[in-house]
Image (cartoon, rainbow, N blue to C red):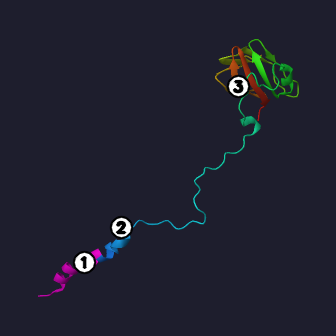
Amino acid sequence: MPRTPFLVATLLPVLLLAACGGDDSAATEPTKPPPSAAPPSSAAPAPPSPSPSQTAAPAPGTAADGRDLDACRDGTCEVVVKEGDTLRFNDKVGNDPLSIVSAGSTFTVTDPSGFTASIGGGGTVTTGGVRIEVGDSEGNRTAIRISPQD
């Protein structure tokens, strides 16, 4: 009787376990990451410094141009507006006049074409060649910053 089938049946499981199992100590030890060139930093990276368009929107008491609406003629100003005000721009800006329909808890602006935008609580409106950042309000007055549209 040949011994080959018996030997294969006995040795095959042993050979398979040896080939697949490997060294048991490697399986129980966690793998360590390779050492890095610099130690990990626990501090978060510093945020970029704000550009002028990222600065906080103005408050009525701090608007640079106060109630001088003529400061907006060149398309750049920081003013306090109220219902009934009209913002006029020079020809270089190329923007139609903007009428303030409401100021306070809701800021609403419209142009001669009928375009109307309302914002409650702050935000940004772009119309024609200008961008209007709506700041804080006190009573029926709202501080806004106008800049050229990017």
Q: Nearer the viewer, mark 3 or mark 1?
A: 3
Location of mark 1 (residue): 14
Location of mark 2 (residue): 28
Q: Quadrant of residue 76?
A: top right
Q: Outermost residue, left direction?
A: 1
Q: Which badge, 3 or 2, comes first in the chain's sequence?
A: 2
Does residue 111 show up?
A: no
5 drawn magenta: yes
Most common SS among magenta residues:
helix
Would you say 33 lies left or right of 48 here?
Answer: left
Residue 62 or residue 121, whichever sits in front: 62
Q: Residue visible at 74% across and 24% down? A: 144
Q: Residue visible at 76% across and 11% down? A: 84
Q: Position of residue 8 (x, y in %)?
A: 21, 81
Location of mark 3 (residue): 135
Amino acid type of the residue tagged 3 in the rendering: Gly
Per the rendered image, the range of residues in magenta is 1-17
Residue 141 or residue 128, whichever sits in front: 141
Q: Position of residue 112 (x, y in %)?
A: 77, 16
